[in-house]
Image: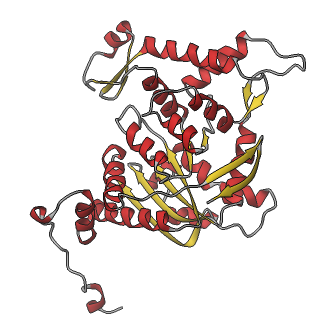
Amino acid sequence: MEKKDLLKHPIQHLDLYSIDGLDQLLRGFEATSFQSRNLAKSRIVLENMQKDETATIFLGIAGAIVPGGLRRVIRDMVKNHLVDVLVSTGANLTHDFIESMGFHHYIGSAHIDDATLEDLKVDRIYDTYVDNQEFGTVELFISKLASELEPRAHSSREFLAYLGSKIQDPNSILRAAYEEGVPVFCPALCDSAIGISLTHLYAQKGSNSQGQRFCIDQIRDNYEIAQIKLKSETTGAIYVGGGVPKNYIQQLEPLLDTMGYRGIDGHKYAVQITTDDPKWGGLSGCTFEEAQSWGKITKDAQMATVYIDSTIGLPLVVGAFIQSNKDFYRERNFSWVEDQLERIER
């Protein structure tokens, strides 16, 4: 490598007067530095991922995405089929359900007496408030809805599609997923108010004549989502935050390998929006390069990571793509018979 090879591409200073819209802003970031350039690269990888007709795209969301104001962004990604499969924390799905019942999240402050909030039954998520009594109402309502189902083991995909069918709010993530046939998996559903609701049902309602009770079968979840990966020619992943949803999507290649399917590639495309640092060793900050060592991401993958608050980064990247692809629509239809994925239709 020679010096002239390193000094070929000058920084292009951003000219705000020449920018009209998010797409032009992110294109302008392509020749800047630091996280702005990473944002621009994320837009490019996202666009290439979307235009690959062979790719099934998984979206993992963790952190307070819905309380943070991104409910409509995720809903639009689902509705317009920017993603084919959603993997979420139970908390985000709970907060989506809260809003679908006409309740709200409220602008608050991070600098307040939390003991007073507890007395008032107001819960705080950094600088956002939610009414704790509304949580109780939602939990009992979800328990009632679940009691109408057959008392047996259900996958989270199966149950969350049922919940989505009961929602009337057009801005709901779960409703959009139900309408568009986008499977929603929650591999840690018990770690949420929805899980609390189902525990209430489990404790209150007896078993059927075969001794079965309503429960969520997380191993069936593994089996179902593995079939999506197996029947997809290529796959891509978008991670907003990290946590369980990220690892759940990343582990599909090792899962299939253990199931006896050799030679299954990892994800060909990957975009990550995170505030976590890789040097602490946690999965949320794990780089895609590290994931390549496990075979979870292909060696030649198109990938981009941007270190930024997801409430800033995701609307910029998705908004830029939508603005430059106004008529974009792609679709994957999943045909299920109980726990068997019959086919993916394109």
The mark tally for this picture is 0
Q: Nearer the viewer, residue 168 or 237?
A: 168
Report x, y in % for residue 6: 29, 85
Can the viewer see residue 197 in this picture? yes
- Counting from the top left corner in percent of width and height, residue 24 is at 23, 63
Identified at 59% across, 69% down, the residue is: 298
Residue furthest to the left: 17
Instruction: Identify which residue is drawn at 44% across, 48% down.
Output: 77
Quadrant where the C terminus lies? bottom right
Displayed quadrant of residue 195: top right
Residue extending farthest front: 327
Residue 242 in sight: no
Looking at the image, which residue sits at the far top? 119
Image position of 1 with respect to 213: above or below = below
Q: Is residue 299 above or below residue 258?
A: below
Question: Measured along the vertical axis of the image, is residue 154 above or below residue 16?
Answer: above
Q: Quadrant of the N terminus?
A: bottom left
Kindly identify the residue that appears in the image at 12 percent across and 61 percent down: 16
Q: Is residue 33 left or right of residue 238?
A: left
* Residue 285, percent from left and from top: 46, 52
Report the residue at 20% width, 80% height from top. 10
Residue 215 higher or lower than 144, as above or below: below
Residue 44 place in picture, x, y as percent: 38, 67
Q: Is residue 63 left or right of residue 15?
A: right
- Please say which color scheme the image uses: secondary structure
Using residue 61 as the reference point, say whether residue 257 is left or right of it.
right
Question: Depth check: 336 or 244 in front?
Answer: 336
